[in-house]
Amino acid sequence: MPYTPEMKELLKKVEASRSLRIEQSKRGENFPRLTLEQIDELLKKYHPDYVMTAKREVQFGANKGAMYPNELVDILEAHPWLDPNKVNLDKVDLTTDLLIIGGGGAGSAAAITASDAGVKNILMVTKLRHGDANTMMAEGGIQGADKANDSPLIHYLDVMGGGHFTNDPELVAALVHDAPLVMKWLEDLGVMFDKEADGTMKTLHGGGTSRKRMHSMGDMSGAEIMRTLRDEVRSRPEINVMEFTSAVELIMSEDGQCAGAVLLNMETEQLQVCLAKTTIIATGGFGRLHIQDFPTTNHYGATADGLVLGYHVGVPLRFMESSQFHPTGAIFPEQLLGLLITEKVRGAGAQLLNIDGEQFIFPLETRDVVSSACIRECGDRHKGIPTPSGRFGIWLDSPMIEVIQGTGSVKKLLPAKVRQFARHGIDIVKEPMLIYPTLHYQNGGLTIDATAQSPVPNLFIAGEAAGGIHGQNRLMGNSLLDVCVFGRRAGASAAKRIPEVKQGKPTLEHVKKYEKMLKDAGVTTDRHSPLLLPDYRGKLM
């Protein structure tokens, strides 16, 4: 629905302040940046990560004693989905050199790279369709230091600073080192990057970046990358893709190596035993757990299955106490609740305004800072804009882009958003969007090294399921980069490992041990995990 008469009345304050903001912009007068002390105070008071009543200790396993979100602990402290006594591992249905669990950007990048390295038997399983992943839903762009005024070192410092210097330095070094290589790789595969008339890459700032290194494809960057990777995977006969197929448990060998997985056909509910010399978990994030009941930008299958599978075999988690809430998710109209409004909008000049039409934060502070400021305005300061359903939001003044970038810029830079809002009678060329923070990204994940190897032999992790790269906060554009960098590294590492693999007898004893740990910890529950798909019955998000 379009803005109500009451909301349109409030828009007059935005319009009234716009002329002053335009003059300030022309003079190069940005809203003042926060000091480190102000950032620390803002985060601790308003960011959801600091709501300690929303967390509890993990009772057992590799991360016993860690304080994680209740929703995550719920699926860790659950009965394994699979009853190991009902699976006959002597009846092997599938064998492969490389099993990739997940059909998004990371899994696809891994498959392509392993294929390039000569692996002839690759199986990718994905519980929805190939490409139904957060990669497809990413909008703003991908970072890579490939301009004369930039370098991987500067990119490294931005990433570390964005993560509040909690990131794993080795993983960040790998990320930024490979970034320019990934840009060339993607372009060679056919990704249609936005370019200037002379063919050079167009780049923009993202929050927390000191250089313009955001490479984009309109506001459909992830979809363009996923389209290209998916087409490349499907063109290679050595890569077999099984859709609507979930991994419900990893298979181990008696000597402690990963040996494949038990697969579930989501349509027939048939179980299959798949033995693999190497396995890559590339299952994405946990947005559909709806941490603290926040709406989410994530795709329907983002239920943290890979975290559960890895945790069951003893892979420690990292940084799972930290979630990323994207500051600009749609809050109105209700049909778009939680929809990602890319950071590219703010990078192009849009400003965040409260009910009085006032700026209250520099729009390109890091995501956790901007989210906290939006929550503060709608909470303690009582300066949020009310919606008909009783929610509160913040204006994102997209018409400012037309002033800064020129007439027609909004339609050119944000074609998908123009269409999505137009369906509901809102013209974002002339009217601001109404936003509020939305659960966007799983900052942490399973432990890996720079080769994407987990502590369990033959088990590799890539993409959002891996932890340590982003520390406590991820910068815009580093997720699409992450899935390509560590997807490629996982594929290359698995390919190198395959000729060396000698495994013992397959076993599911770890599932029985996990069930015993659950019982010994005194946890009483009827939950089972991995969750596979979210259950929205009786819930309003």
Image: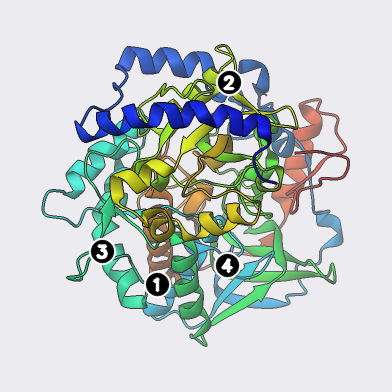
Mark 3: which amino acid?
Leu
Q: Quadrant of the C terminus?
A: top right
Residue at point 55% right, 42% down? Answer: 440
Label 1, label 3: how far apart the Cα atoms are: 13 Å
Indicate the secondary structure of the residue bearing disc 3: helix
Figure check: 55 above or below 541: above
At label 2, which amino acid type do we have? Answer: Cys
Task: Mark 2 or mark 4: name the one nearer the start of the chain.
Answer: 4
Lower sequence index among marks 4 and 1: 1
Name the mark nearer the viewer: 3 or 2: 2
The location of residue 181, given as percent across then percent down, is: 26, 64
Q: Nearer the viewer, mark 1 or mark 2?
A: 2
Disc 1 target residue: 113
Residue tagged by mark 3?
181
The residue that mark 2 highlights is 378
- Looking at the image, tell me whether mark 4 or mark 3 is earlier in sequence order: 4
Residue in front for this viewpoint, 212 or 128: 212
- Distance in Å between CA atoms under marks 4 and 1: 17 Å
Mark 4 element type = loop
- Is any atom of residue 205 visible in this view? no
Contact between labelled residues 3 and 4, with CB atoms less than 8 Å apart: no
Give the residue pinned by disc 4. 131
N-term mark: 1 or 3? 1
